[in-house]
Image (spheres, rainbow, N blue to C red):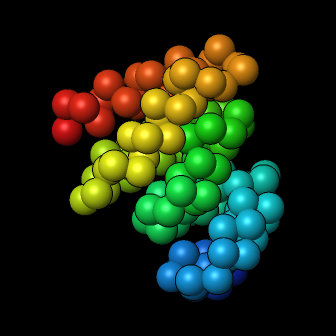
Amino acid sequence: MVDKRTEKDVSNIIEGLRINQDPRSIEMLEDVGTNSSVDAIRELTSRALVKKNQHDSLKVVIANKGKGINDMSTVVAMSTINELLSLEDKSEAIRILEDTVNMHSDEEVRDNARSVKALMALS
């Protein structure tokens, strides 16, 4: 378990990377945050990547097995889906969802993308 101070520090780091315009910030969030063994860190990271609302950041949480909408933790997956649904501009997310449905090699990832795409069409 993570103490409150460490949790706040990690949250601040993730938020800093979210607002950072350097393309490497996406790589850092993916490498460290989405690969964390701590669900809360993966959740914060996935939400930050969605909020960036850029092609590369959205691709991490939509098209990668075990990350974002495909995370084994339902809390992380649902949090990511809710963040996608709350995007003001959903166009890039929908494009990536469509590409994932049409071209991804993993059936489970395609199915998850199809489901999220349907939810986004309703929102």
Q: Which of the 4 quarters of the picture holds residue 123?
A: top left
In-front residue for pair 3/97 = 97
Q: Residue at x 57, y 30 (%)?
A: 100
Q: Seen in the image, is 1 located left or right of residue 94?
A: right
In-front residue for pair 113/95 = 95
- Tell me if residue 69 comes above or below residue 83 in the rendering: above
Q: Residue at x 32, y 25 (%)?
A: 118
Q: Which of the 4 quarters of the picture holds residue 9?
A: bottom right
Q: Position of residue 58 (x, y in %)?
A: 53, 53
Residue 74 visible (yes or no):
no
- Tell me if residue 36 comes above or below residue 119 in the rendering: below
Q: Residue at x 61, y 58 (%)?
A: 56
Q: Seen in the image, is 120 located left or right of residue 100?
A: left
Q: Position of residue 35 (x, y in %)?
A: 78, 53
Callout count: 0
Q: Position of residue 116 (x, y in %)?
A: 40, 31
- Tell me if residue 93 comes above or below residue 104 in the rendering: below
Q: Residue at x 53, y 32 (%)?
A: 99
Q: Seen in the image, is 24 located left or right of residue 59?
A: right
Residue 17 visible (yes or no):
yes
- Tell me if residue 123 comes above or below residue 90 in the rendering: above
